[in-house]
Image: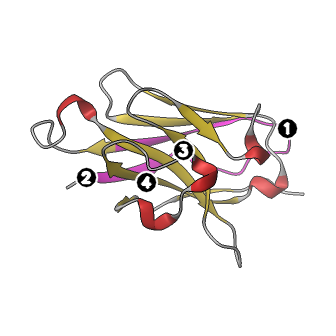
């Protein structure tokens, strides 16, 4: 069982920055070495949920093309908090951002996975970048 809770969502002017956090709660006994694939997804009104960034068990990170060079995914050393630093925000970044997790290595890069590849989800946090 993995519980995820996101925080840090806000309304930010275009060009601004924001950092999202995801607190992950799980038993180390069940997931030794913190071998859990972690990711950020987002969903805008009327659109499908899309993968934004992924953090694999070996530290490999992948990003969707639209955020490359602007967003950075990271994890604290204890492995229980996932971050998403978002720079140069654009109106099209507005969405509910979700933290997702699944035991073991990530199935594939973030651009090639689907929501069904992740078994655990947080409730989401709203990011708004006005026009």
Residue at position x 53%, y 63% from top? 114
Number of numbered discs: 4
Q: Secondary structure at mark 3?
A: loop
Q: What residue does disc 1 label?
A: 15
Tell me the CA gap for discs 2 and 3.
Answer: 20 Å
Residue 93 in the image, given as x and y percentages of width and height: 75, 53
Q: Quadrant of the N terminus?
A: bottom left
Tell me the CA gap for discs 4 and 1.
Answer: 26 Å
Mark 3 nearby-residue class (10 Å; few <14, some 14–19, many ≥20): some
Mark 1 or mark 3, which has the lower sequence index? 3
- Image quadrant in which you'd find residue 47: bottom right
| Drawn side of residue 29 relative to residue 34, left or right | left
Mark 4 or mark 1, which has the lower sequence index? 1
| Drawn side of residue 46 relative to residue 78, left or right | right
Q: Secondary structure at mark 1?
A: loop
| Drawn side of residue 62 relative to residue 55, left or right | right
Badge nearest the viewer, 1 or 2: 2
Q: Secondary structure at mark 2?
A: loop
Residue 89 in the image, given as x and y percentages of width and height: 79, 43
Q: How is the image coloured?
A: secondary structure
Q: What residue does disc 4 label?
A: 100
Q: Nearer the viewer, residue 7 or 73?
A: 73
Residue 8 belongs to the span the image colors magenta: yes
Mark 4 nearby-residue class (10 Å; few <14, some 14–19, many ≥20): many
Tell me the CA gap for discs 1 and 3.
Answer: 17 Å
Residue 57 in the image, given as x and y percentages of width and height: 38, 33
Q: What residue does disc 2 label?
A: 2
Q: What residue does disc 3 label?
A: 8
The answer to whether 26 is drawn above or below residue 45 in the figure is: above
Q: Which residues are magenta?
A: 3-23
């Amino acid at each position: 069982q993995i519980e995820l809770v996101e925080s840090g969502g806000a309304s930010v002017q275009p060009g601004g920055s924001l950092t999202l956090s995801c607190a992950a709660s799980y038993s180390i006994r069940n997931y030794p070495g913190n071998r859990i694939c972690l990711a950020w997804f987002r969903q805008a009104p009327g659109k499908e949920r899309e993968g934004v960034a992924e953090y694999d068990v070996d530290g490999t990170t992948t990003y969707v093309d639209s955020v490359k060079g602007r967003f950075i995914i990271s994890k604290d050393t204890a492995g229980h908090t996932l971050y998403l630093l978002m720079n140069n925000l654009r109106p099209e970044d507005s969405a509910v951002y979700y933290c997702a997790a699944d035991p073991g290595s990530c199935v594939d890069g973030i651009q090639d996975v689907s929501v069904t590849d992740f078994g655990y989800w947080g409730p989401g946090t709203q990011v708004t970048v006005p026009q």
